[in-house]
Image (cartoon, grey):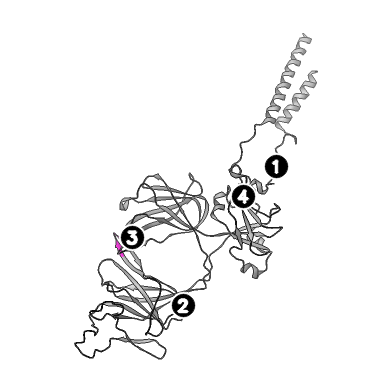
Amino acid sequence: MTTRAVTLCASLALGSLFFPGSAFADDLKKDSLTLADFAQGLALTPREPRAVHSVLLPVDVYRGLAQSDFDDLRVYNHAGVQVPHAVRTLEPPASRVTESASLPIFPLRARPGAADPRTAVVLEATRDSTGTIVAVRLPQPASTVDPTSPDEAAPIVAYLVDASSFDQPMDALHVVLGDQQPGDQVLSVSIEASDDLASFRSVGPAQALVRLRYGTHEIEQDRLDLPELRARYLRLSWGSAPAPPFEAVRAEAVRDVVTRSMAKERVQGKWEKPGEVALYDLGGTLPLETLRLVLSEDNTLLRAALAGGAKRDGSFKPIWEGTFYRVRHAGTLLESEPAPAEGTSARFIRLRTSPLGGGLGPTPPELELQRRPEQLLFAERGPGPFELAFGHYGAVASAFAPDELLSMLPEAARRDLADSDCTLGPVRPLAGARALTAPPPPPPLKKYALWAVLVAMVGLLGVAAWRLVRKEA
């Protein structure tokens, strides 16, 4: 081999190394995934033919995704062909109207010596032509020594509430308790309804009115729930238990509300710092609506701060700070309301507790969450049933914007779209866990071969140069 030929071969080898041609270039990444490439799937069976179907995403889908923003979610028809889909958050309805009004109330007293205070209530009312109570009076006894006559000093065992002027079905009553009764106040109130003041019917089980002072905190529950009740008069009674006076009663009615049930989940946490910091893994990035600590022991008051994050070791954003409680008083269990978390999406929740109140036990309390439903939309293209596939490390986003997909429908059909019109099958494995993480890269055989060629060319070049030197010598 001449010196010129060896030099040319070495140049070509070096050029291939630093300026690779099409033979050694990496292929461009293309998303050519099929149903079988995803980790898991579940069947979607539409209940009736429609152009666009809807499904509320179950929590298993969130926990099975490998990427954020639903990039690794697909819908396939029965022939294995991908169909157009979109995901949207269902916003709470804006048409919420609350009406309330203060209602006239009249104290009712028991007859002395009566065994049952409710049957001993003395009631005589004067009404106007519309049925509105003008006055409630005590009947005059026939004899001043009649033992059944009412006593102005007898305890108040009930209140008559005149709701004849409130023309909406009542959803609740709010009761303002007076301060004459010292100490804590827990009143078990029975509710009865009537339209003629002659016969009363019971309205559900007894409910509690509560005002408790616990350290520097006050717990108050002034609401009595009503099942969209229509009644002209209500009687609120509590037997012979001592009770504070009622200062006011307000009726409340909520109208034009479309209620979407929030999915509830409970998650067990682990202490990062025993008694002070706990971490809860939700299993997937979930859109949160509320959070609540489920305390296991009665008469527990806990000051806590909750924060959310996408990664265990990443940054956490504050969600809420305040007190959670579980109090049992006079046989009534009272628990704190959930903390608001609307607009938060998180995979991990971190709890920080205050040492006030003695802390918690060896296991952190359960975290109860409510998540806002997110809806999958997909087009009915091809034969069903359809398959929702999810979980792949390398999937490329392929969803439409919700408005794009819904543009296929007339305006009336968009408004009438159900939250879910499909039956969901159980989650089943497809490719399994191997689809969730990228495999290790293959050994760079091309690079090794290229370096081998280069070394061989350099060796040949050295041999040729040595021969040339010997020849000239």
Residue at 31% x, 84% y is 123
Closer to the chain start, of discs 1 and 4, is 1
* Residue 472 percent coordinates (x, y): 78, 10
Residue assigned mark 1: 28
Sequence-wise first label, 4 or 2 = 4
Foreground mark, 4 or 2?
A: 2
In the rendered view, does 330 fall on the left or right side of 129? left
Q: Secondary structure at mark 1?
A: loop
Q: Residue pushed farthest top?
A: 473
Instruction: Classify 256 as above or below 38.
Output: below
Mark 4 to mark 2 CA distance (whole Å): 47 Å
Amino acid type indicated by mark 4: Asp
Q: Dot 3 corresponds to which residue? A: 327
The CA span between labels 1 and 3 is 62 Å
Instruction: Provide the residue span drawn in magenta.
Output: 212-216
- Residue at x 36%, y 58% (from the top left corner): 325
In the depicted structure, whether residue 265 falls above or below residue 132: above
Amino acid type assigned to the residue bearing label 1 in the image: Leu
Residue 427 on image: x %, y %: 58, 52
Q: Secondary structure at mark 3?
A: strand
Decide which of 386, 324 is in the foreground and name it.
386
Residue 72 — which label?
4
Give percent across and percent down for residue 377. Answer: 63, 60
Q: Is residue 26 left or right of residue 178?
A: right
Between residues 147 and 264, which one lies in front from this camera angle? Answer: 147
- The type of residue carrying mark 3 is Val
Q: Earlier in the sequence, mark 1 or mark 2?
A: 1
